[in-house]
């Protein structure tokens, strides 16, 4: 079983708290009943009350729990769908934040990313390509085109100074990448993200879901080493923090892994010798060009199972609370 | 459009009225304590309209709203959009647009040559959904504004941003054509076309229009050469985008029809002369018709499930109801 929006599962931690509240309130009820009734009545009423309130507390907690599970978008079981798409549309998404200038990968993270993209595109004569650069904001630098010359030109202008807003807002970047795919295309869509994943701003939850719904995988090329490196500035210094110590820019794999996982993509390491071959193979596999008929396997959405359970338990709780169990009382 | 994936689930709404009866009106509903009042001597109880009463009513409203939302969520509410998907490769079209100062001449009533051209191009692009269309601007120099792209909205935005005289003043038709040809070189389209719009005589650039047209012809790129201008004296008003200086005057000299004719012939294209806004529109319509390639289109329905919104609200209502009824008002189960 997989979840589309696993962040909702955190809500489950509230269930024990709510259950506890329900129990406390049923104890209070018993005290009230004791005050209002004689001892003979009390023992009979209490017995029923205890059972009823226990069952209905459990039912209500179960209702809330299954609604939370439904909210998280569970999927299981696979179906095959025939896919008529052929060929690729690729958006190259470049992180041009300051940390991309770090030189733990030579000549620099950004420079190597650029070279990788250039070589990759020259190996893909049939793909349509587009390019977006992002920092705090995202700027499309090339619309979807087959024009190899224009791609090389657009990449030549790629630098940290092309966007003034500071930061690394990957949410804006991914949104601009989605917007760069034109409508009415019968090609497979792929985003290739070059980033060090460092100090990412923005809430990607929503945009990751969009990527999943539109079936756009993000192939993430993690730029940087775990050891990190200092960030050079224009005037041959390095970026320092408030205390005057040089800032070390490390690659944040976990953030990048999350993006890849959520969108059916993969994480690659920049600086890996086999990177180009791996990317080329992956893109070839995803283009569907060499297959006669492509079947796409998708996991079936099953949220309604949990909503059904919730509705059933909710109905049961009404019955338990309101139907009499004995003729006495 | 909105659809329900599993409308049969809506039948569950039929359960709601009996359950409401059971929960709120059933005379023998449990959870209440029946006490004999036979010996009661005081005044009768009057149910006062209290905070408690309002709270309970609100709680009931929240509870049953949540019920209805849950049933709707079960029915699978989905937003669908239709999208035309092109299965065949369209043509590649490069528009080579004169951006010299004389394009501001106001002989294309009610507007200038340039604004008219821009409107006509916009309409043309809107009609050709499946083609890769690009834009090259030229005056003293030539520049690639947009490579041939399927992203029509990007093209429109770039077209809107073009300002006259950004590339100096002059007319280098040859450079414009050569640059457009360069960007069509790597194209895989069977049909590749340049549409040249100019109102002047080639007077700048290192490449002659004829040489550029020949190269284009060799690569299989046809050129539609359109001369723009009424041939009469026209007022002109243009602001230099760099200095902000305003130029006013009149222009008289028109385009060089002979050269344009040669450009068209060398590349296997056609030459047109546009003397007014109406003619220019007609020319683009003619090109649109001539360049129609067979296209295979499929209508695809994209589905975006929206049940999550219903679930979130229902969950919030249920938790809110629980808090309100049990904790704030303090009713037992």
Image (tube, rainbow, N blue to C red):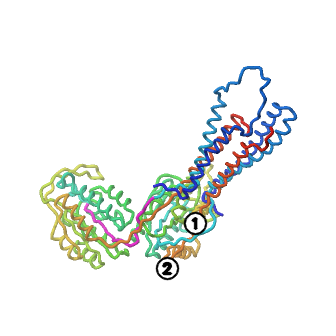
Q: In this view, does A219 lie above or below B240?
A: below
Q: Dot 1 lies on which element?
A: loop
Q: Are marks 2 and 1 in contact (CB under 8 Å)?
A: no
Residue B187 in picture, x, y percent from top left: 37, 74
Residue corresponding to mark 2 = A292
Q: Quadrant of the N terminus of chain B?
A: bottom left
Residue A234 in view in this figure: no
Residue A191 in picture, x, y percent from top left: 51, 65
> In the rendered view, does B155 fall on the left or right side of A39?
left
Q: Chain ID for label 1?
A: A
Q: Is residue B29 above or below residue B221?
A: above
- Determine the residue positioned at 42% across, 62% down: B83
Q: Which of B48 and B290 is in front in this view?
A: B48
Residue A272: name its quadrant.
bottom right
Q: In this view, does B35 lie above or below B143?
A: above
Q: Is residue A228 above or below residue B212?
A: above
Q: Give the range drawn in magenta.
A: B81-98
> In the rendered view, does B212 fall on the left or right side of A105?
left
Residue corresponding to mark 1 = A264
Q: Quadrant of the C terminus of chain B?
A: top right
What's the distance in space between the residues labelled 2 and 1, CA to CA? 23 Å
- In the image, residue B87 lies in the stretch drawn in magenta: yes
Q: Dot 2 lies on which element?
A: loop
Query: Which-is-in-front pick, marks 2 and 1?
Result: 2
Residue B240 in picture, x, y percent from top left: 27, 52
Q: Chain ID for label 2?
A: A
């Amino acid at each position: 079983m997989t979840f589309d929006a696993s962040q909702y599962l955190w809500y489950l931690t509230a269930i024990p708290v709510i259950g506890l509240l329900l129990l406390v309130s049923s104890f209070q009820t018993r005290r009230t009943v004791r005050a209002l009734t004689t001892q003979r009545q009390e023992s009979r009423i209490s017995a029923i009350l205890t059972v009823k309130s226990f069952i209905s507390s459990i039912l209500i907690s179960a209702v809330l729990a299954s609604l939370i599970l439904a909210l998280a978008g569970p999927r299981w079981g696979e179906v095959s769908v025939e896919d008529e798409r052929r060929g690729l549309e690729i958006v190259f998404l470049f992180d041009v934040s300051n940390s991309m200038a770090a030189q733990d990968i030579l000549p620099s993270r950004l420079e190597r990313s650029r070279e990788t993209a250039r070589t990759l595109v020259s190996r893909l004569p049939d793909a349509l390509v587009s390019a977006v650069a992002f920092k705090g904001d995202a700027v499309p630098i090339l619309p979807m085109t087959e024009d190899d010359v224009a791609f090389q030109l657009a990449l030549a202008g790629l630098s940290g100074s092309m966007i003034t807003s500071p930061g690394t807002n990957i949410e804006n970047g991914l949104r601009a990448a989605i917007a760069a795919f034109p409508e009415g295309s019968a090609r497979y869509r792929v985003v290739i993200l070059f980033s060090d994943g460092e100090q990412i701003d923005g809430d990607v939850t929503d945009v990751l879901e969009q990527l999943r719904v539109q079936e756009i995988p993000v192939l993430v090329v993690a730029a940087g080493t775990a050891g990190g490196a200092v960030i050079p500035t224009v005037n041959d210094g390095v970026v320092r923090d408030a205390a005057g110590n040089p800032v070390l820019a490390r690659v944040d794999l976990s953030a990048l892994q999350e993006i890849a996982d959520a969108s059916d993509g993969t994480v690659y390491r920049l600086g890996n010798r086999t990177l180009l071959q791996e990317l080329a193979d992956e893109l070839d596999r995803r283009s569907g060009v060499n297959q006669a008929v492509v079947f796409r396997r998708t996991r079936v959405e099953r949220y309604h199972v949990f909503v059904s359970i919730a509705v059933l338990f909710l109905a049961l709780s009404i019955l338990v609370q309101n139907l009499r169990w004995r003729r006495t009382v | 459009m909105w659809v329900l994936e599993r409308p049969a689930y809506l039948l569950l709404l039929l359960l709601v009225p009996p359950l409401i009866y059971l929960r709120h009106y059933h005379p023998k509903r449990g959870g209440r304590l029946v006490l004999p009042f036979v010996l009661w001597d005081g005044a009768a109880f009057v149910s006062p309209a209290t905070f408690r009463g309002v709270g309970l009513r609100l709680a009931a409203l929240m509870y049953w709203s949540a019920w209805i939302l849950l049933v709707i969520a079960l029915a699978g509410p989905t937003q669908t959009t239709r999208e035309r998907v092109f299965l065949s490769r369209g043509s590649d079209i490069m528009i080579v647009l004169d951006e010299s100062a004389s394009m501001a001449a106001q002989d294309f009533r009610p507007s200038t040559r340039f604004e008219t051209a821009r409107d006509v191009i916009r309409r043309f692009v809107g009609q050709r959904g499946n083609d890769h269309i690009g834009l090259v601007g030229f005056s003293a120099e030539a520049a690639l504004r947009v490579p041939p792209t399927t992203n029509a909205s990007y093209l429109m935005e770039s077209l809107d941003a073009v300002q006259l005289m950004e590339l100096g003043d002059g007319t280098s038709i040859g450079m414009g054509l050569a640059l457009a040809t360069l960007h069509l070189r790597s194209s895989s389209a069977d049909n590749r076309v340049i549409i040249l719009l100019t109102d002047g005589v080639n007077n700048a650039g290192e490449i002659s229009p004829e040489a550029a047209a020949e190269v284009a012809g060799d690569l299989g790129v046809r050129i539609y050469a359109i001369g723009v201008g009424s041939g009469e004296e026209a007022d002109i008003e243009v602001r230099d985008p760099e200095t902000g200086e305003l130029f006013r005057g009149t222009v008289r000299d028109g385009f060089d029809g002979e050269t344009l004719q040669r450009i068209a012939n060398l590349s296997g294209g056609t030459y047109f002369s546009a003397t007014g806004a109406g003619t220019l529109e007609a020319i683009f319509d003619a090109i649109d018709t001539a360049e129609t390639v067979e296209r295979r289109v499929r209508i695809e329905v994209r589905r975006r499930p929206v049940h999550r919104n219903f679930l979130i609200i229902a969950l919030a209502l249920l938790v809110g109801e629980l808090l309100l009824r049990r904790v704030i008002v303090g009713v037992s189960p």
